[in-house]
Image (cartoon, rainbow, N blue to C red):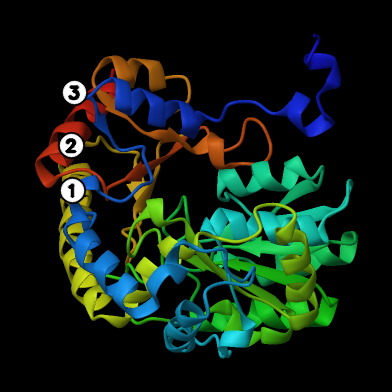
């Protein structure tokens, strides 16, 4: 059978991403220092808690943990999430919270409810590459909005929204992937004001905000325009990616449609993993584990900053973020990070070229994303040493 002729337009146009290929490479070459993978450190995943969490969940909820559940999400988990969301400035009740299959599942559900072919989605420059793949899977047109060190520029967003209809604006205001930058409160307020004036929806991706090692937390962007915001987060960075538990808060009319559509996708997110996350959050484990993550990741960020200062030649610049998992490195205009990646891999170090995070081909070639979360301090030092040898060749 000729399957190729039967594929949908999005399937025919889909291509493997650089990030996916680098994940495969890191798994296949254990000696490589991977500053590429944007995943938590496997050695810090709290596998030792699984027995206790399972026993506690079964004791508390019984056989229900193995049963079908509500499409909106496991009620005890939604109730446990409310105070954590309020701490971020997202004021809601359990009836407003949707538990999805990972943060990416939440984004997909929202796109299914909102996007038609040809719709326009505005994103930051650069932006989170997998989100762009989701938007394009729905045949949306993705356009970039200019940014500075504090995130999306309000004037640039205003100009974009005046020029064409935009279905929604997708942003990652806190410890953005890939740049690590964060919007200060006044920038968030300004972006919310522009969105309100243009009557456009904001989709805030906030999966890294709990990984703060310095500075003062800012309220979520959603707090500045709750009536026109979709707030997305997940438990992957706080607990474990394999739980596949995402969280979404959005206007009630949109939530109702999202839940109807989710029933036809996967019916519900696993009751079992939702119950484990409930026990993780309510049993005092989350705060203790977060301290452990902060201590490890903050030390690795300091090690990366120090190694870059020691080993890289003149012409490179970076801004040390206050949290998250990534540092954005900018080289001289002559650098082509994508072109030298095979050489870097051959010398035992991997990174993600900055061009992978741009909508338009050819942009960001002098940049790269370095991930410090999954690498030891000693490996970071060696990895940067190898990287410096490549960029000075």
Which of pointers 3 and 2 lies earlier in the amino acid sequence? 3
Measured along the vertical axis of the image, is residue 255 above or below residue 384? below
157 lies left or right of 100: right
Image quarter (top left, top right, bottom left or bottom right) of the N terminus: top right
Q: Looking at the picture, how far across and down is residue 32, in whole percent?
A: 23, 25
Q: Which residue corresponds to mark 3?
A: 31
Q: Which mark is residue 233?
A: none
Q: Which residue corresponds to mark 1?
A: 43
The CA span between labels 3 and 2 is 21 Å
* Residue at point 57%, 72% (across, down): 73
Give whichever of 105, 376 is nearer the camera.
Answer: 105
Q: What kind of element bears circle 3?
A: loop
Res 386 seen here: yes
Q: Which residue corresponds to mark 2?
A: 311
Give whichever of 127, 61 is nearer the camera.
Answer: 61
Image quarter (top left, top right, bottom left or bottom right) of the C terminus: top left
325 lies left or right of 375: right
Which of pointers 1 and 2 lies earlier in the amino acid sequence? 1
Name the front one of labels 3 and 1. 1
Name the front one of labels 3 and 2. 3
165 lies left or right of 356: right
The CA span between labels 1 and 2 is 27 Å
Name the front one of labels 1 and 2. 1
Q: Looking at the picture, how far across and down is residue 12, in whole percent?
A: 77, 24
């Amino acid at each position: 059978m000729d399957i190729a002729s039967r594929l949908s337009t999005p399937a025919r146009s889909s291509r493997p991403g650089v990030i996916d290929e680098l994940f495969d490479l890191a798994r296949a070459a254990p000696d490589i220092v991977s500053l590429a993978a944007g995943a938590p450190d496997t050695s810090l995943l709290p596998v030792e808690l699984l027995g206790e969490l399972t026993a506690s969940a079964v004791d508390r909820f019984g056989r229900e943990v193995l049963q079908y559940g509500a499409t909106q999400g496991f009620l005890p988990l939604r109730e446990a999430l409310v105070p954590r969301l309020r701490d971020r400035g997202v004021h809601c009740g359990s009836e407003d919270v949707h538990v999805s299959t990972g943060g990416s599942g939440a984004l997909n559900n929202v796109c299914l409810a909102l996007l038609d072919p040809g719709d326009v989605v505005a994103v930051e420059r650069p932006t989170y590459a997998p989100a762009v793949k989701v938007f394009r899977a729905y045949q949306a047109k993705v356009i970039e909005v200019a940014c500075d060190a504090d995130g999306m520029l309000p004037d640039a967003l205003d100009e974009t929204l005046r020029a064409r209809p935009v279905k929604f604006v997708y942003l990652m205001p806190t410890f953005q992937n890939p740049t690590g930058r964060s919007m200060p409160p006044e920038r968030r307020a300004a972006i919310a004001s522009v969105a309100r004036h243009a009557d456009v929806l904001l989709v805030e991706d906030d999966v890294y905000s709990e990984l703060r090692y310095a500075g003062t937390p800012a309220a979520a962007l959603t707090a500045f325009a709750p009536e026109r915001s979709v707030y997305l987060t997940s438990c992957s960075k706080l607990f474990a990616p394999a739980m596949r538990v995402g969280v979404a808060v959005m206007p009630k009319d949109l939530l109702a449609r999202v839940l109807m559509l989710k029933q036809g996708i996967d019916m519900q997110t696993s009751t079992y993993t939702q119950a484990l996350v409930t026990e993780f959050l309510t049993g005092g484990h989350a705060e203790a584990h977060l301290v452990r993550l902060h201590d490890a990741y903050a030390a690795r960020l300091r090690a990366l900053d120090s190694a870059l200062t020691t080993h890289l030649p003149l012409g490179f610049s970076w801004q040390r973020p206050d949290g998250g998992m990534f540092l954005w490195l900018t080289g001289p205009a002559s650098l082509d990070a994508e072109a030298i990646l095979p050489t870097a891999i051959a010398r035992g170090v991997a990174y993600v070229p900055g061009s992978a995070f741009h909508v338009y081909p050819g942009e960001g070639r002098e940049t790269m994303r370095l991930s410090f979360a999954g690498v030891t301090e000693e490996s970071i030092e060696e990895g940067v040493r190898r990287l410096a040898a490549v960029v000075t060749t």
